Image (tube, rainbow, N blue to C red):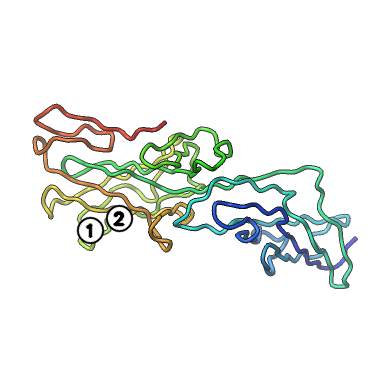
Amino acid sequence: CFAKDINTTLSLMNNQNLSWGTSQARVKFFDDLNTTSRFLTQTNNSATFSTSEGNFTSGNAILNFKVNFDRNTSTPDNPFNIAKNDFNITSIMDTSNTSGNDFNRSSDMSATFVYGRTHAPRYRFTGNNGNASIYYEMYCGSDGNKTLLPSNVIGDSDSVGWYLNKNHISSDGTITVVDENNSAHVVTTSSILPLSIVTGSGYSTATLNYNSSKGFPYKTTIQDKPSSWLIYDPYNPSATVNDFEVEFYGGANNWTGKQTNHTTTDSIAAPVTRKRILW
């Protein structure tokens, strides 16, 4: 029975080739945010935690920790699976250099890591106001294992390899800012932030309002700022927001054409409805 504080070194031993880099090169360890253990240091694919003697019962203690992997804002990852038995305790030592035993491997468990983003197509609105749907999506390229994605996902027709996650909930990430990428700020949102998520649908809706001061038509870029793990910009690895384009046209009878949201355009000709296709 340990009667002293111990240090435990935990290592990710099963190395996987990921979409970029390897799991051992990208792994990051963290505290579990409670009192069972305290993160001390990490070297490569190994981390050392400290457990106080007060956490032992009958010679055993629970070592809780969190693990994640480096994320590249410009390079998406195929989904990958990490199991408990991919880790190994390489050292357990108390202050008197007494060693301990490895963890119980009789029952394994695993977690799947997926790369997510928020995404909106281009929108065209008639008049000063419009509702823009912003979708929560996950990535799986042609060389990935789609079976690792959660159930209830639908492919995105305007972005190959991306899938709408209809299971997305607020704890998976939210959008806290919706703003025009323009110093004039003539387009604002009247939606409450963070945006609410439509249950079982995998998207949020932002109501955009244009004050008409720049005339019609008016085209601009809207930025949405989601949780950091939902930012994706293939051209800017330092991006802190996602963006999409919107166009505002004047009142009815001003133009004829298609729009990419769910509302029919105004026109003196036959109106055309264009929807975001999901498959």
Amino acid under label 1?
Answer: His
SS state under label 2: strand
Disc 1 to disc 2, how far (Cα)?
8 Å
Q: Give the mark nearer the N terminus: 1 vs 2.
A: 2
Give the residue at mark 2: 179
Q: Which image quadrant is residue 52 in?
A: bottom right
Residue 4 at x, y percent in the picture: 85, 68
Amino acid under label 2?
Answer: Asp
Residue 132 is labelled as none
Give the residue at mark 1: 185
Residue 68 at x, y percent in the picture: 60, 56
Q: Residues within 10 Å of mark 2 (few under 14, many from 20)?
A: some
Give the answer, above or below, for where 69 lies relative to 142. Answer: below
- Which residue is found at the position 50% from the left and 41% from the top? 142
* Quadrant (top left, top right, bottom left, bottom right) of the C terminus: top left
- Which residue is found at the position 26% from the left and 43% from the top? 123
76 displayed left or right of 255? right
* Quadrant (top left, top right, bottom left, bottom right) of the N terminus: bottom right
Q: Residues within 10 Å of mark 1 (few under 14, many from 20)?
A: few
Q: Which of 264 and 188 is in front in this view?
A: 264
Q: Which image quadrant is residue 269 in?
A: top left
Q: Which image quadrant is residue 136 in?
A: top left
SS state under label 1: loop
Q: Which residue lies furthest to the front in this view?
A: 143
254 displayed left or right of 153? left
32 displayed left or right of 122? right
5 displayed left or right of 43? right
